[in-house]
Amino acid sequence: SAAGAGPPRLGLAVGARRPARNSATGSALLAQLSAAEFDRLSRATKSEGAPGARETLRARLAEVRERGWASVADEADPGVGWIAMAVPPLGPSLRLAVALRVPVDDGVRRAEALAALRRAGAEIERRAAR
């Protein structure tokens, strides 16, 4: 829950799917794509949506790239959200991201989560380099 009372809950069932653009992890991964890769993927998945949706998503992904992380509020549990950070690509076709669930209005927890995500990403890179 948002206040930390009780065990944390996940908003989606195991194995549930949702569009990458609607999740922090998906947004972190999409932000790693080149413009050509983004265009190819959006055409292949027919993710046109409403007029201007592709441009809106492209702008949001540019913000994610600039900031270095993505966040999304959890609609199933108000007051909490997800923060995700992409791990630098480990190969031409291997892209990973790490994510944590945090209270949306707690700047201290957000900073702690970002630090933990950076450490996790660095550890993944270190292990992959072996």
Image (spheres, rainbow, N blue to C red):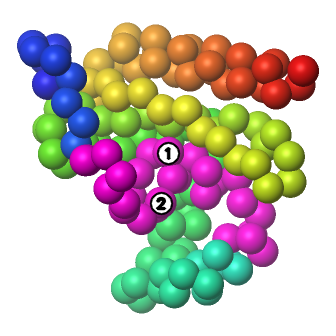
Residue at point 42%, 27% (across, down): 100
Q: Residue furthest right?
A: 130
Q: Earlier in the sequence, mark 2 or mark 1?
A: 2
User: Where in the figure is residue 53, as x and y percent of width and height?
Assistant: 44, 78
At x 21%, y 23%, the residue is: 8
Above or below residue 125? Residue 86 is: below
> Quick check: 57 left or right of 126?
left
Start-end of magenta stretch: 12-38
Q: What residue is pinned by disc 1?
A: 25
Instruction: Check disc 1: other Cα within 10 Å, few if <14, some if 14-19, many if 20+.
Output: many
Side of 123 where 130 appears, left or right: right
Total numbered labels placed on residues in the image:
2
Amino acid type indicated by mark 1: Thr
User: Does the magenta-highlighted stretch encompass residue 29?
Assistant: yes
In this view, the residue in front, 89 or 63, is 89
54 to the left or right of 104: right
Residue 87 image offset from top left, x and y in percent:
69, 35
- Res. 20 mark: 2
Q: CA distance from mark 2 to mark 1?
A: 7 Å
Q: What kind of element bears circle 1? A: helix
**In this rendering, does residue 52 appear at all?**
no
**Disc 2, SS:** helix
Do tag 2 and tag 1 residues touch (Cβ < 8 Å)?
yes
